Image (tube, rainbow, N blue to C red):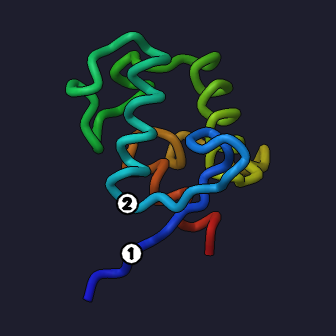
């Protein structure tokens, strides 16, 4: 049986009510934020697209992403965790969030 990780999302989706979000929804939420922030069609963002190498995000985009993740997924991201491996793609970000929620 596959392991399913559930994230609790802050009021980003439901005002004043945390909502549970499953794997595909979390990935879609990340992709939507990336698309909205980088002004690119969401369909062009793949789970393994390189956000920085492909020019979707720069250092300001990273700061927006960190704020979004902390607010939406209720995690605290330490300075020592601000390494490319944690944020280089949707897959990397999701894996990072999984580790933070354990």
Q: Is residue 78 left or right of residue 38?
A: right
The C terminus - image quarter? bottom right
Whichever of callouts 2 and 1 sits on the residue coming sooner in the sequence is 1
User: In the current view of this chain or complex, which residue is farthest to the left?
Assistant: 43
Q: Is residue 18 above or below residue 57?
A: below
Would you identify the image quadrant in which residue 97 lies? Answer: bottom right
- Label 1 neighbourhood size at 10 Å, few (<14), some (14-19), many (20+)? few
Residue 82 is at least partly visible in this image: no
Classify mark 2: helix, strand or loop.
helix
Q: Is residue 26 left or right of residue 64?
A: left
Residue 23 is marked as: 2
Residue 1 is at least partly visible in this image: yes
| Residue drawn at x 49%, y 68% as measured from the top left | 6
The residues tagged by marks 2 and 1 sit, at their Cα atoms, a distance apart of: 7 Å
Q: Is residue 81 above or below residue 68?
A: below
Horizontal and vertical percent position of residue 92: 43, 50
Decide: marks 2, 1 in contact (CB < 8 A)?
yes
Horizontal and vertical percent position of residue 16: 73, 46
Would you identify the image quadrant in which residue 11 lies? Answer: top right
| Residue drawn at x 70%, y 33% as measured from the top left | 67
Q: Is residue 29 left or right of residue 98?
A: left
84 or 35: nearer the eye?
35
Q: Is residue 9 above or below residue 12?
A: below
Residue 4 is marked as: 1
Classify mark 1: helix, strand or loop.
loop
| Residue drawn at x 66%, y 36% as measured from the top left | 66
User: In the current view of this chain or complex, which residue is farthest to the bottom?
Assistant: 1
């Amino acid at each position: 049986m596959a392991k399913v990780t559930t994230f609790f999302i802050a009021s980003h989706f439901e005002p004043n009510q945390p909502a549970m979000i499953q794997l595909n929804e979390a990935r879609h939420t990340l992709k939507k934020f990336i698309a909205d922030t980088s002004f690119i069609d969401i369909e062009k963002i793949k789970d393994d697209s390189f956000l920085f190498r492909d020019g979707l995000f720069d250092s300001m985009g990273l700061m927006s992403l960190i704020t979004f993740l902390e607010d939406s997924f209720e995690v605290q991201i330490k300075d020592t965790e601000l390494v490319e491996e944690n944020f280089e793609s949707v897959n990397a970000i999701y894996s990072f969030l999984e580790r933070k929620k354990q």
